[in-house]
Image (cartoon, rainbow, N blue to C red):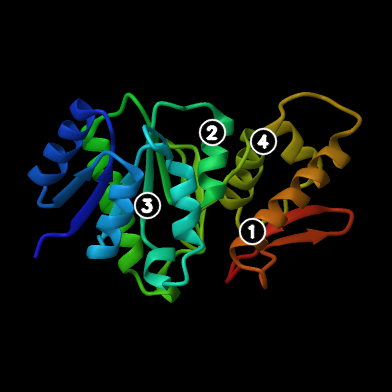
Amino acid sequence: MKPRILLLEDDNAIAGTVAFALEREGFAVEAVALLRDAEAALRRTLPAAAVLDVALPDGNGLDLLRRWRADGDARVATLPLMLLTARGEEIDRVLGLEAGADDYLPKPFSPRELVARVRALLRRAAMPRAAQQVFELDEPGQRIRYRGAVLALTRLEYGLLRELILARGRILSRETLFDRVWGTQSEAADRTVDTHVKTLRAKLRDVHPGADPIATHRGLGYTLADGEG
């Protein structure tokens, strides 16, 4: 049976391109143009994943995303979901990921990349929780997943966590982290790094409240736990 993808996109040309690309790769696509139609389609048959536009004639796709993530049905709340939108600025990406999107693809996009990202969403969803990597670094996309969830990171938070992941198990001093991520000299290097580590820890706890994978070494710096975060 073909995996069913729910596509919410009000631009007929884009919807046709996405549907063709997915169907050619073995997916079944149900395309709708309105929020209310997406809600109805979801309730009829739960899809394997959903691709949502943001700006729609009858509302905002982010509001729909938030409702689904807060749904009492765990299958809806954890549905693999990608945002597809013309908005590519950092704040829009952050808002989408904070709302619960698993991935974010700005327009214009490559249909092949979209298909690859949908396949990646489905692979992660099919993995037993214990088998998922704690951290997944996607350098081309400049995004990091923690326990399967895409983190909504600023550019500096991404750079800081990237350095810790690449040096996993090794202590990096505040000066080293500051030089690699900020690339400038500053007397406030220690305070700047500490502040960003604090916000990183908060975002990691949002995903897994009981974890603190970033370890502080007094007088030395920080390291990322080599085991379970």
Q: In which quarter of the view is residue 162 placed?
A: top right
Whole-number angstrom distance, CA of label 1 to CA of label 4: 15 Å
Q: Do labels 4 and 2 touch, CB within 8 Å?
A: no
Residue topped by disc 2: 92
Residue 60 position within the rendered picture, expressed as x and y whole percent measured from the top left = 45, 39
Q: In which quarter of the view is residue 188 placed?
A: top right
Residue 103 position within the rendered picture, expressed as x and y whole percent measured from the top left = 41, 46
The answer to whether 32 appears left or right of 74 in the picture is: left
* Mark number, residue 156: 4
User: Upstream in the sequence, badge 1 or badge 3?
Assistant: 3
Q: Residues within 10 Å of mark 3 (few under 14, many from 20)?
A: many
| Residue at x-position 80% and y-position 59% | 216
Q: Mark 1: which amino acid?
A: Leu
Q: Do labels 2 and 1 touch, CB within 8 Å?
A: no
Residue topped by disc 1: 204
Whole-number angstrom distance, CA of label 2 to CA of label 1: 20 Å
Residue topped by disc 3: 81
Whole-number angstrom distance, CA of label 1 to CA of label 3: 20 Å
Establish if 164 lies above or below 192.
Answer: below
* Mark number, residue 109: none
Establish if 20 lies above or below 118.
Answer: above
Q: Mark 2: which amino acid?
A: Asp
Whole-number angstrom distance, CA of label 2 to CA of label 3: 16 Å
Residue 207 position within the rendered picture, expressed as x and y whole percent measured from the top left = 59, 62
Whole-number angstrom distance, CA of label 3 to CA of label 4: 25 Å
Of labels 1 and 3, the one closer to you: 3
Q: Mark 3: which amino acid?
A: Leu
Q: Secondary structure at mark 1?
A: helix
Q: Do labels 1 and 3 touch, CB within 8 Å?
A: no
